[in-house]
């Protein structure tokens, strides 16, 4: 197999990966929007905050946030809310979205979609680059 064919195969594989990123992003976005449609807002109290450092020196500090809340007369203590770079303080009151079918599942309204959009945008950008490279190699 010549070098041109190997490059073409490599760029095509990159295009498949980019398509996978876009599909994954839309799948996550659909799942997030579905959750948001049926979710119920409740007031919760931050019950625990623990700091951890992500892999890689430039990743920064992140915080695991745990909240406690009550829904339909049942108490849900220390439910993991999210990991993010913003620090919350124990005792702080926050609004969370919970799944009424499974009230022990919660999320903050601003944490659901950003990763989905990032996957979609990265997939599109990568796809454009791969198509350009495929056209260049095909000439």
Image (tube, rainbow, N blue to C red):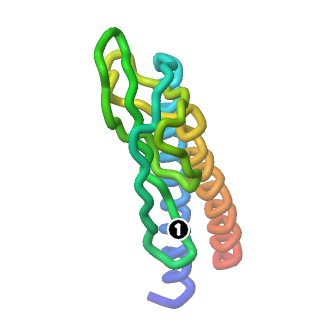
Q: Please tell me which residue lies in front, 15 or 59.
A: 59
- The residue under label 1 is 14
Left or right: where does residue 77 sit relative to residue 117?
Answer: left
> Which residue is pictured at 34% across the width and 22% down the height?
103
> Which residue is pictured at 49% across the width and 61% down the height?
17
Is residue 71 depicted above or below 33 in this figure? above
User: Residue 117 at what x, y percent from top left?
Assistant: 62, 46
Label 1 SS: helix
Left or right: where does residue 45 sit relative to residue 133?
Answer: left
Count how many numbered circles sit on residues in the image. Answer: 1
Q: Please tell me which residue lies in front, 37 or 25.
A: 37
Q: Please tell me which residue lies in front, 34 or 63.
A: 63
Which quadrant does the C terminus fall into?
bottom right
Q: Please tell me which residue lies in front, 125 or 10.
A: 125
> Which residue is pictured at 44% across the width and 87% down the height?
1
> Which residue is pictured at 52% across the width and 54% down the height?
21
User: Residue 47 at what x, y percent from top left?
Assistant: 40, 39
User: Residue 26 at what x, y percent from top left?
Assistant: 54, 40
């Amino acid at each position: 197999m010549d070098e041109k064919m190997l490059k073409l195969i490599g760029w095509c594989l990159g295009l498949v990966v980019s398509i996978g990123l876009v599909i994954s992003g839309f799948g996550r976005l659909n799942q997030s929007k579905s959750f948001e449609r049926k979710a119920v807002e409740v007031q919760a109290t931050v019950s625990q905050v623990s700091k951890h450092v992500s892999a890689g020196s430039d990743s920064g500090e992140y915080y695991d946030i745990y909240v406690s809340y009550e829904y339909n007369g049942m108490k849900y203590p220390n439910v993991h809310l999210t990991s993010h770079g913003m620090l919350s303080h124990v005792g702080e009151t926050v609004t969370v979205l919970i799944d009424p079918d499974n009230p022990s599942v919660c999320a903050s309204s601003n944490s659901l979609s950003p990763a989905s959009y990032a996957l979609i945008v990265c997939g599109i950008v990568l796809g454009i680059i791969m198509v350009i490279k495929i056209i260049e190699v095909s000439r």
